[in-house]
Image (cartoon, rainbow, N blue to C red):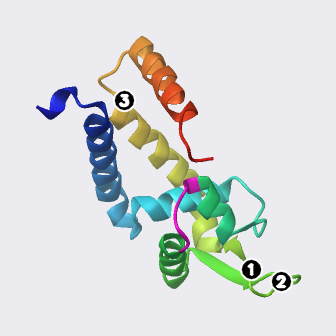
Amino acid sequence: MHEKNTVYLIKRANLNFDKIANHTLASYGITHSQFKCLKYLYLFDNGSLNQRDLEHYFHMSNPTVTRILQNLEKEGWIKRLANGKDKRHKQLYLTDKALSMQENFKDIANQLESQLTERLTDQELDHLQTLLRKMLAISLID
């Protein structure tokens, strides 16, 4: 019944990927959501991003990102320090612990991507990405 429902299939694929990612990342003591935030922070100079940047990029609510960042800070992955201009906005800094894991996390991201797409041919993967981009282009979310 659900096998022809596109929204259902996309949601199930996403949930399945989250489950695989959470299982893989459990040995590092982080969740897939925390991993995604760390990966995004790796792309920028340390301290150049704040919480709102993550909220916007991931289309997540303030409370959700707050919880993720609190847990990352508690476990020693990041520091949140007040911005000199506006004390209400905290800049995000990767700790030495996070920086030392950067290469490992790149490898894990590649491994997870491979697991997700291992049953697809290169042509099928290209086609899937094209279709997903088309679907995202009609999104109401910026």
Q: Residue 15, which numbered label?
A: none
Residue sitting at the far front: 140
> Nearer the N terminus, badge 2 or badge 3?
2
Mark 3 and mark 1: span between their CA atoms? Answer: 39 Å
Q: Where is residue 54 in the image (x, y as percent from the top left)?
A: 62, 62
In the rendered structure, are the residues bearing label 2 and label 1 in contact, judged by CB atoms less than 8 Å apart? yes
Q: How crowded is mark 1: few (under 14 residues within 10 Å), some or many (20 or more)?
A: some
Asked if the stretch drawn in magenta spans residue 93, the answer is no
Q: What residue type is labelled 3?
A: Thr
Figure check: 91 above or below 137 = below
Residue under pointer 1: 89
Q: Position of residue 75 (x, y in %)?
A: 48, 80
Q: How crowded is mark 3: few (under 14 residues within 10 Å), some or many (20 or more)?
A: few
Q: Which amino acid does label 2 sit on?
A: Asp
Q: What residue type is labelled 1?
A: His
Camera-side residue: 132 or 44?
132
Q: What stretch is highlighted in magenta?
A: 58-62
Q: Residue 117, which numbered label?
A: 3
> Nearer the N terminus, badge 3 or badge 1?
1
Task: Please tell me whether mark 2 or mark 3 is closer to you in this view.
Answer: 2
Q: Position of residue 88 (x, y in %)?
A: 74, 85
Q: Residue 86, which numbered label?
A: 2
